[in-house]
Image: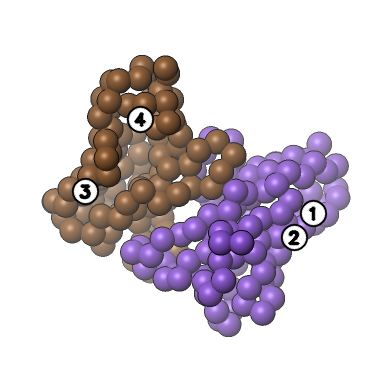
Amino acid sequence: GAGVSQSPSNKVTEKGKDVELRCDPISGHTALYWYRQSLGQGLEFLIYFQGNSAPDKSGLPSDRFSAERTGGSVSTLTIQRTQQEDSAVYLCASSEQPGTGYGELFFGEGSRLTVL
Amino acid sequence: TQLLEQSPQFLSIQEGENLTVYCNSSSVFSSLQWYRQEPGEGPVLLVTVVTGGEVKKLKRLTFQFGDARKDSSLHITAAQPGDTGLYLCAGPSDSNYQLIWGAGTKLIIKP
């Protein structure tokens, strides 16, 4: 596909279960971001990948959250032992020009996570 | 700490009216971007402004970057229901590759 693809689009899980969210960025984009968005709110930075560099994990809210990016392409965000406060939309974005403020971030449609 | 404050947080107006929303900071930004997010979708870039005092027009949308590069505004003329969405401004962090995001203005245009 031409755009950023995220799956699943919706996930309902029980408190305490683990979830995996997947992001397939635009081919050739070296920068990949994960954000979290609560209902109608702004974007909360979670993690950033750039090429083969070590990821910036400074936005991850707890050690229950982790992410990896394999082969510089697909990324997976994993949330262990989910809590109700983890309920949100998780957005993935990719870019050719990381963080310069000039390059465009291309977003997926997001994965809506609901923890019961 | 660089912050972007957007106002108003929420705006609901009738089709055909004009409106302006704001993105303000006490910090200087080298550039600012405006994104629009429609329900159930990710944000989409509308414009990037890079020069103090710059004005960019995108059909009925007019974007302005303040002379001091600390603020930006978005003016919509003759708003239409298709303009409904969450408008987010973002600017590059001084210290790293991250973007600083405003909390957004939720805009509803009623037919």
User: Is residue A66 shown left or right of residue A51?
Assistant: right
Marks 1 and 2 close (CB-CB < 8 Å) = yes
* Pointer 2 residue: A78
Secondary element at image label 1: strand
Q: Closer to the observer: label 3 or label 4?
A: 3
Residue extending farthest to the front is A1
Do the residues at pointers 4 and 1 share their chain?
Answer: no
- Colour chain B is painted in: brown
Nearer mark to the viewer, of 1 and 3: 3
Residue B4: x and y in percent read 35, 47
Q: Quadrant of the image for the C terminus of chain B?
A: top left
Question: What residue does disc 3 label?
Answer: B56
What residue sits 61% from the left and 61% below the top? A1
How much space separates mark 3 and mark 2, taking CA atoms?
Answer: 40 Å
* Label 4 crowd bin: few (<14), some (14–19), many (20+), radius 10 Å: some
Q: Which residue is pictured at 83% across the width and 43% down the height?
A: A13
Q: What amino acid is found at the position of numbered circle 2 in the picture?
A: Thr
Q: Colour of chain A?
A: purple
Can residue B39 be seen by looking at this rendering? Answer: yes
Q: Chain of mark 2?
A: A
Cα–Cα span, label 4 and label 2: 35 Å
What residue do we see at 56% from left, 66% from top? A26
Which residue is under mark 1? A19
Local SS, label 4: loop
